[in-house]
Amino acid sequence: MSAKKLHFGKLHFGLIGAGRIGRVHAETLAFRLPEAEIAAITDVNRDAALALAARCSIAKVAASAAEIFADPKIDAVLICTSTDTHAGLIAEAAKAGKHIFCEKPISLSLEKIDGSLAAVEAAGIKLQVGFNRRFDSNFMRVRQAVASGEIGTPSLMHIVSRDPAPPPLSYLRPSGGIFLDMMIHDFDMARYLIGDEVEEVYASAGVLVEPGFRNEDDFDTALVVVHFRSGAIGTIDNSRKAVFGYDQRVEILGSKGKIATENRYPNQVVVSGEKCVYTDLPLNFFMQRYTESFALELELFTKAVLEDKPIPVTGADSRIPVVMALAARKSLDEHRPVRLDEVAR
Amino acid sequence: MSAKKLHFGKLHFGLIGAGRIGRVHAETLAFRLPEAEIAAITDVNRDAALALAARCSIAKVAASAAEIFADPKIDAVLICTSTDTHAGLIAEAAKAGKHIFCEKPISLSLEKIDGSLAAVEAAGIKLQVGFNRRFDSNFMRVRQAVASGEIGTPSLMHIVSRDPAPPPLSYLRPSGGIFLDMMIHDFDMARYLIGDEVEEVYASAGVLVEPGFRNEDDFDTALVVVHFRSGAIGTIDNSRKAVFGYDQRVEILGSKGKIATENRYPNQVVVSGEKCVYTDLPLNFFMQRYTESFALELELFTKAVLEDKPIPVTGADSRIPVVMALAARKSLDEHRPVRLDEVAR
Amino acid sequence: MSAKKLHFGKLHFGLIGAGRIGRVHAETLAFRLPEAEIAAITDVNRDAALALAARCSIAKVAASAAEIFADPKIDAVLICTSTDTHAGLIAEAAKAGKHIFCEKPISLSLEKIDGSLAAVEAAGIKLQVGFNRRFDSNFMRVRQAVASGEIGTPSLMHIVSRDPAPPPLSYLRPSGGIFLDMMIHDFDMARYLIGDEVEEVYASAGVLVEPGFRNEDDFDTALVVVHFRSGAIGTIDNSRKAVFGYDQRVEILGSKGKIATENRYPNQVVVSGEKCVYTDLPLNFFMQRYTESFALELELFTKAVLEDKPIPVTGADSRIPVVMALAARKSLDEHRPVRLDEVAR
Amino acid sequence: MSAKKLHFGKLHFGLIGAGRIGRVHAETLAFRLPEAEIAAITDVNRDAALALAARCSIAKVAASAAEIFADPKIDAVLICTSTDTHAGLIAEAAKAGKHIFCEKPISLSLEKIDGSLAAVEAAGIKLQVGFNRRFDSNFMRVRQAVASGEIGTPSLMHIVSRDPAPPPLSYLRPSGGIFLDMMIHDFDMARYLIGDEVEEVYASAGVLVEPGFRNEDDFDTALVVVHFRSGAIGTIDNSRKAVFGYDQRVEILGSKGKIATENRYPNQVVVSGEKCVYTDLPLNFFMQRYTESFALELELFTKAVLEDKPIPVTGADSRIPVVMALAARKSLDEHRPVRLDEVAR
């Protein structure tokens, strides 16, 4: 299958997984991307697949992922299943010659990630991992400021990344814990925004807001110091509970200035009342906050495949945040700074 | 045609006019409103109609509006043509029993508007006029604050409404001038936000930024004081040239507080540089600023028709802003405050 | 008395009036201006004078203003008495060769103002009127932006000026009403900020928040449109009741940009809570808001006298706002726009 | 000398040191605190002492600190000399029975601090150390929010504290380095704001903006993670060079909300220009930013002495930040987290 061939038509997707994120991507492909078409969908929960197919006018509900891989009309697959199935599905998709958009992370195991990347490389297909926040207009603007020299050479960075409310406790163990499940986005963001690699991390964490986390060997609050090759120092803070809403900000100090982002709000209204001056709370849910970034990552993936251009998130981009998460956990367990090369070359 | 019948299916639209605003509405109907379908499109410029039909998968490109009115499969029409054609198209559409979404204003002539409203009433169909700003999340929030008593009884209001750059001079005369073309949105906003009727206006205006306006008997800058029945006093200021972008704000003082909106920005990034602390400019174009409001007005129209519920913008809502604009021009010409009932009952 | 003589020493003040504003000025002179010394104080309420003398280490409590005028050691007088006494005191002070700092307005009568200005001119002494807001860092910055061309040629201006709570009803009649008592500061501000003269005003007003104002022939809410010679259009809004605090802002649109001020807050703290994102209320009282401006106006007066340089607020500056207030009242009474030259040349 | 005796009069100060901070305090005492009087001043640079005495009407210029300690009319001393002299002067002042306000830190040596505190305790006099930022209206508001439970239990804190420009390299070695000279204020702030003690720190630092720091064994950029007893985690970042001005902010996440401060600006003006929306830079110098806090700390010290009430900054408050700074340096040198009890009990 050549990009040339695709260029004159649409990109035909097979969607594997009709859960929350699968629905988000399906709506983007169906309603916002004229260049894309969802040719087939599958989910272990067939009812979910049927419902989403109806909503998005998807012609075929496949019995299995295998059926999608076998469909010659399908150019690319969207893997929106649980993390433990990603590596296997990537291997099969690569073997079938399908381009792949896979939700993050590929796996909690570096070996499996390396296997996936090798399979992708061998098949010569394109793989993009769903680090959607790179495509948020705020973070793109920060990246542009750093890349263009607008704020000079970065020296200090703070990433704040907090959820409005903790997930169910049952979610925690399979997720891999706060570093692999939640901070992984921020590990990616740190590398992306500064444009440099992290050499060492130092992690702190605690159970400060939801005592039940203790039984799950997980943490509701975490702070990691990241040391870049350049000498720049950053922090990432995660909390599972910011009662006022989704709190996602970054600030970077550079030799020529500082750049900082604020949260997104549902409106730009300020009320001056008898007790205080107030605004509504910031957007409360990642799907509202990152709506545009979810659409843009798929648009860029679709274009990159159709025009045979580089994918905006590389194989290394999908692997390094997992290395960072593993190093952070090791740092926490051993109560000392840990170099990334202690965890993986 | 009964709403009941429609309730189980989609609302089928005929789109008349494939210009700028026609394209905006077509994309909303095609990509964002599952309950809507564009069954046919027409435009005096057939190429424009063909292009938009291709973009939005519209099955039929009609030769004329008449062909659309005659099509029994079409439930509602979207009138996106030039203002001088609105009244005639509304009359025909009403006769054909089609529900109507028409861009503002219906006409620059009160007689024609009254004729249109009578035709709509006689036909028992629904008519909505495109005062999209009512559906902007900022202005909805302001309206909610006033309606709920959050800021008490309003006493003073300021509406600021400025374009980033003047239109071509050739645009001015057919447009009816700054009061009918530009401030008409703000006249609607004033009534909507305060929830009260205006009794009197006092208008000032000048040619302060673009000398060419003088030859067109028009103004690039205008300020109107509006007096509400309740005694509340408001101002509306319009400028054709706010070099920093689209400047659309409102603030209301009430007995229990103040509410104010800010502009929308492309991002929430603040840079502290060597000379100043700065942000990017606010959104520069009404289509970016009001994207969501354009979608929401069509969604609410579609639902109101499908469920046979009241339209969110009434016939009076479409007529009174024209009365206000005519009174404002009379006030300017006669250099004195003018009551609305001097212009029309 | 020559400026040269003074240059090597301090400026010795006689303070007439130990009320609220007298106390503010006394503290500035005593504690913040090394170049000034209060040599004597007087007040019809002798206890008030004694108390302030003790607080500010003022050596002499004079029995009357006449005693102060007769004191050869006194270089300048500060007139902080009620408005109806200003013109008489200015005449006496001028005759005695004392420089004068007088609270605004000189008088509610143009004839008396003209008499005062003539007496000042004849005596060759310096007179400054207490339009302190000119010396507020926000409004100075706005003036600088207009004067330097930073925002180009002004076309639209909005001044908002609201008190936190109405004064006692007994205050109203002697005060001259909302235009002469409250908006007079804003009339001065309008001329100062734009750097141009107003030709015509159009006034609206109402009793919207405090019904008792009706019995006093006064208004708690007022809006005046001001037309500048250049064609620029401005509005001034006044309310006696902004429940959230002192609301004093201005915004100007120019051909190259817009400049706007925000209120002052007691701190720069933002709390994101469970219901809303909020800050404390803005400063609630003019003495907190304008602390620095009260000090700066006296500092500049003191320096202007000591160095024999021009006063920053001229005789015309003290007269024109009264003309504007009288024109505004006439506009309101006659329900039509009124030119300033209808009221006074 | 009893507080009772003082209560009916002023507090008479002896000022030791007429340098930059000495001048700030002298002006506060002379011009803003009616309850205080500077009875005498001394400085090794006699000209500086004479000039300040003239400026602030200080009656006596003493030849030495000893002369001040011997003066029975002096109730309290202000120690504004270089750090290495603080401990000795405190010992002498305590012996002379004078209350003491001393600039931070007492010493870079814990032994000397402990000696000073013991001398103070033995003499039964009051000692306050100049951690002025505690008295800044922003940080007081944050402390109030934490103490009152307004934001619930703190879990994460970030302190940002950056100077506009590096000091001369010659300043660095005597200063004790970035942790003892600069971050010491932030170590105090961390304890004060959270109202809890720090158990462990982890420090990172680098020379990222001013290469000359390397030769001085100092750092221009530093980041320290602080672990509180409660489990809360904080970061402090310091930079010697924030080109846009003095950058001093804090943010705390609690179980019920978040509180954050912004910098102080010279005005509240926003300009929307052709390229960007901008404000002037934040206040650039600590004396402007912290003017009010310098006055308030002296006011509270004066009142505490006059009324024999507790000093708002205790002996422990003056000692612990030095322990934290020493632990931070040890953490940096040994590249591991360091508990405070490794450095001092």
Image: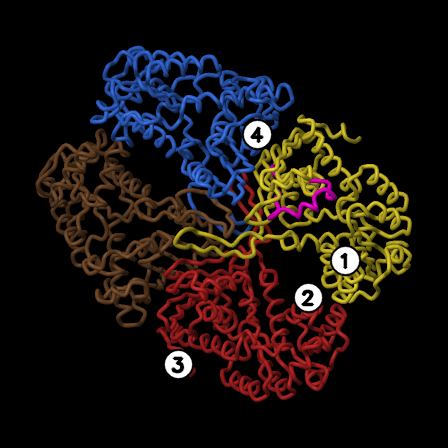
Chain colours: A blue, B brown, C red, D yellow
| CA distance for labels 2 and 4 | 50 Å
Report helix, strand or loop for mark 3. helix
Badges 4 and 1, same chain = no
**Is residue C45 something one can see in this rendering?**
yes
Q: Viewer-proximal residue, A96 or C219? A: A96
In magenta segment, residue D169: yes
Which three-letter amino acid code belongs to the residue tagged 3? Asp
Q: Viewer-proximal residue, B38 or D101? A: D101
| CA distance for labels 2 and 3 | 42 Å
The residue to which callout 2 is attached is C32
Please state, as top left, top right, bottom left or bottom right, where the N terminus of chain D lies in the image: bottom right
The chain to which mark 1 is attached is: D
Which three-letter amino acid code belongs to the residue tagged 1? Ala
Please state, as top left, top right, bottom left or bottom right, where the C terminus of chain D lies in the image: top right
The residue to which callout 3 is attached is C341
Q: Which residues are magenta?
A: D158-177
- Residue D18 is labelled as 1
| CA distance for labels 1 and 3 | 59 Å
**Residue D261 location in percent, x, y?**
58, 45
Picture layout, residue A49 above or below residue B328: above
Mark 4: give few (<14), some (14-19) or many (20+) Cα within 10 Å.
many
Q: Quadrant of residue B213?
A: bottom left
Which three-letter amino acid code belongs to the residue tagged 2? Arg
Q: Residue at x 90, y 43 (%)?
A: D122
The chain to which mark 3 is attached is: C
Q: Residue at x 56, y 69 (%)?
A: C132
| CA distance for labels 4 and 1 | 43 Å
Q: Are marks 3 and 4 in contact (CB under 8 Å)?
A: no
Badges 1 and 3, same chain = no
Report helix, strand or loop for mark 2. helix
